[in-house]
């Protein structure tokens, strides 16, 4: 021991300091590199916001806050009259319908996959869901236009229209004439597109439920439904909501598929079988051939979508924070 | 390194002997893309000189040529003379197309249904809602028209086709002019929007009792039922190459500065009323003179030898008289 410590002492202070400072240098470098990466996101985001505001400025000055509740969109009028109410309505309504379809179906698939599905069927279904996520959105758009649209217009919509004919409220929501290109068709395509987000994230978080919890519940005689309802869902609530919010973000911003199948009408109509438009579809459709105030108005629409998405995500964060607090107590 | 040096040397030699082929770049309207790329392909085979055309839309094409990032820009909606002067641009019509109303009506063959600009305007305004409306029946006393609602189909994306179609409606319907007007994207009073010519063609083809408007080529290739139109002279005309060219020949090009002529609703008994030219934009004094000259050579070649290729793709070549005017413009205005 003594000999060893002598050697250490002899080689001692200098090497040790060097090694330590090398470690420190590595640490500091790593710290700054990662920090720079993180800050660059803020810079990029800030840059996008600034350029959107600069581009949208002429429209902001011209229309002001009235842009938000004006329904008329007349780029060829002199001077152009532009209002965002139609696209805002379309964006929200298609996203809401899409989520109403995708949340139950997505959670259903996830529960089936983790709780009920025989092992041999798990892989094919899991793969199918992942494949849905891999299909490019333009393919969804084309499929919607050539296959889903005709089916809905010729079979599904006439059925719904006749079922709800004369029923108050529902009769105006499901009103004719049937159309290949409508808000509802776009929402359905969106639902299919966001399904994998909800499903695969739910599957992942469902897997994190400790088996011992479930086994205990089964042990006291719970049915599968009761286990899912009272053990799995409460345990994974935060993760599931995260997945749903990711899906909602996608639904709000999805462009290509929606552009194909929504029918591009800026008028708000009570029927969901009527054509409409979303913010992103309006931009995609009209940007290339636009100029001046019209183009500035489209950029302002983009800014609105940015703000809208920001609020949705912020609301989701807040909700998650509340839930976590509750769980903590 | 050796390899690199060879390339640089080869480039220098080519440049110094002025046999150097400047690659021409163009960008703009989507409508003429098929014919420009066909011409470019044939031109390359014949001369070895290439051309790269990006179909990014007329509006973007105008922006690109103003920013001098391309040798030429292409637009379906011509620029006004003042704008041309301000930017130092030359403009001329390169090739024509025609827009035809197409319908999906049971038992009605192509060319049987007759429409007028006024009736077409009222359909697109949503004032005429059913096919057996008195105004349509009056133009078609012999046809049995269904009593079903008309499904109006239009473009969802901003486009030159829409510009020319709405321009025609503005000229033939005072109501349309007052309420909607002319533009690449307008405030549509009714109807569903489909993406691109192919979207409108597909939607009309699939939907019973639908009406839409597409470039002639799309109507022909999709075997859609086109309508006949009543023109300015009050005659019923069918969409044919002859009636399209008649519209161009009857237009007064010589008196229009910068060839600012929109070919809709032109006079003449044989003229198809919704004809449209697509235009080329170039700088009078280009920064890259070699590319500019090369582009003019290409356009000259296209006028001389490209007519047949254009017709094969259902475009309409510019009439001889107009081509002569354009060649004069080149020698007068473009500095080499």
Image (tube, coloured by chain):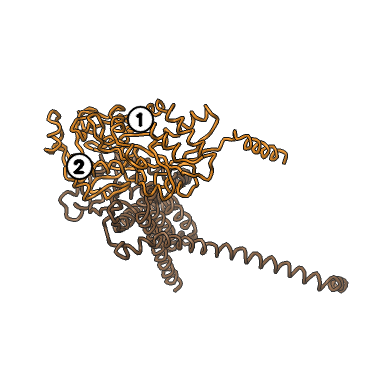
Chain colours: A brown, B orange
Q: Residues within 10 Å of mark 2 (few under 14, many from 20)?
A: many
Q: Residues within 10 Å of mark 1 (few under 14, many from 20)?
A: few
Q: Chain of mark 1?
A: B
- On the image, which quarter does residue B234 sit in? top left
- Which SS class for mark 2? helix
Would you name the residue on which mark 2 appears?
A: B123
Residue A132: x, y in percent?
Answer: 43, 45
Would you name the residue on which mark 1 appears?
A: B321
Which residue is painted at 39% across and 31% down in the image? B324
Please indicate, yes or no, whether residue A217 appears anywhere in the rendered image.
no
**Pointer 1 and pointer 2: residues touching (CB < 8 Å)?**
no
Q: Is residue A75 above or below residue B20?
A: below
Residue extending farthest to the front is: B332
Q: Is residue B193 above or below residue A93?
A: above
Please indicate, yes or no, whether residue B86 appears anywhere in the rendered image.
yes
Q: Is residue A37 left or right of residue B317?
A: right
The answer to which of B310 and B132 lies nearer the viewer is B310
Q: Chain of mark 2?
A: B
Q: Which mark is residue B259?
A: none
Residue extending farthest to the right is: A3
| Quadrant housing the N terminus of chain B | top right
């Amino acid at each position: 021991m003594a000999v060893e410590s002598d050697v250490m002492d002899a080689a001692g202070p200098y090497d040790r300091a060097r090694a330590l400072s090398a470690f420190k240098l590595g640490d500091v470098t790593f710290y700054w590199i990662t920090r720079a990466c993180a800050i660059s996101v803020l810079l990029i985001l800030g840059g996008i916001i600034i350029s959107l505001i600069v581009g949208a400025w002429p429209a902001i000055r011209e229309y002001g806050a009235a842009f938000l509740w004006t329904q008329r969109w007349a780029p060829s009028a002199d001077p152009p009259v532009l209002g965002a109410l139609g696209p805002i309505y379309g964006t929200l309504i298609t996203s809401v319908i899409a989520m109403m379809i995708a949340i139950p179906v997505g959670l259903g698939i996830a529960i089936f996959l983790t709780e009920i599905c025989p092992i041999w069927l798990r892989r094919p279904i899991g793969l199918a869901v992942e494949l849905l996520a891999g299909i490019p959105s333009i393919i969804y758009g084309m499929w919607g236009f050539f296959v889903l649209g005709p089916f809905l217009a010729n079979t599904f919509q006439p059925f719904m229209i006749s079922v709800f004919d004369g029923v108050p409220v529902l009769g105006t929501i499901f009103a004719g004439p049937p159309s290949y290109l409508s808000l509802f068709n776009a929402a359905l395509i969106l639902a299919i597109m966001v399904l994998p987000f909800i499903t695969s994230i739910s599957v992942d978080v469902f897997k994190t439920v400790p088996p011992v919890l479930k086994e205990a519940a089964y042990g006291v005689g719970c049915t599968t439904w009761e286990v899912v309802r009272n053990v799995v869902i409460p345990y994974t609530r935060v993760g599931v909501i995260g997945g749903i919010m990711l899906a909602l973000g996608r639904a709000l911003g999805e462009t290509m598929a929606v552009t194909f199948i929504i029918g591009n009408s800026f008028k708000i109509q009570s029927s969901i079988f009527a054509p409409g438009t979303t913010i992103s579809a309006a931009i995609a459709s009209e940007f290339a051939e636009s100029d001046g105030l019209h183009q500035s108005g489209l950029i302002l629409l983009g800014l609105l979508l940015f703000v809208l998405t920001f609020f949705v995500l912020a609301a989701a964060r807040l909700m998650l924070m509340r839930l976590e607090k509750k769980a903590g107590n | 390194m050796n390899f690199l040096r060879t390339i640089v040397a080869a480039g220098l030699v080519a440049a110094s002997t002025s046999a150097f082929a400047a690659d021409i770049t163009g960008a703009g309207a989507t409508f003429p893309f098929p014919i420009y790329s066909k011409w470019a392909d044939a031109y390359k085979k014949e001369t070895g000189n290439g051309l790269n055309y990006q179909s990014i839309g007329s509006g973007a094409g105008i922006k690109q040529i103003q920013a001098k990032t391309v040798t030429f820009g292409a637009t379906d909606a011509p620029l006004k003379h003042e704008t041309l002067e301000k930017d130092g641009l030359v403009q001329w019509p390169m090739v024509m197309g025609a827009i035809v109303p197409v319908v999906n009506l049971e038992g009605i063959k192509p060319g049987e249904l007759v429409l007028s600009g006024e009736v077409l305007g009222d359909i697109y305004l949503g004032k005429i809602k059913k096919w057996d409306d008195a105004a349509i029946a009056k133009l078609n006393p012999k046809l049995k028209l269904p009593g079903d609602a008309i499904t109006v189909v239009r473009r969802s994306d901003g486009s030159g086709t829409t510009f020319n179609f709405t321009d025609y409606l503005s000229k033939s319907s005072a109501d349309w002019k007052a309420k909607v007007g002319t533009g690449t994207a307008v405030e549509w009073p009714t109807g569903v929007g489909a993406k691109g010519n192919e979207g409108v063609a597909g939607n009309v083809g699939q939907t019973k009792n639908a009406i839409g408007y597409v470039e002639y080529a799309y109507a022909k290739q999709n075997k859609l039922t086109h309508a006949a139109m009543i023109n300015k002279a009050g005659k019923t005309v069918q969409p044919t190459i002859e009636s399209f060219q008649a519209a161009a020949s009857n237009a007064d090009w010589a008196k229009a500065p910068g060839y600012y002529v929109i070919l809709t609703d032109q006079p003449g008994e044989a003229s198809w009323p919704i004809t449209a030219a697509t235009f080329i934009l170039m700088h009078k004094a280009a920064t890259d003179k070699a590319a500019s000259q090369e582009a003019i050579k290409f356009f000259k070649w296209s006028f001389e030898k490209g007519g047949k290729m254009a017709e094969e793709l259902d475009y309409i070549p510019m009439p001889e008289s107009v081509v002569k005017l354009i060649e004069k413009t080149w020698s007068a205005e473009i500095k080499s």
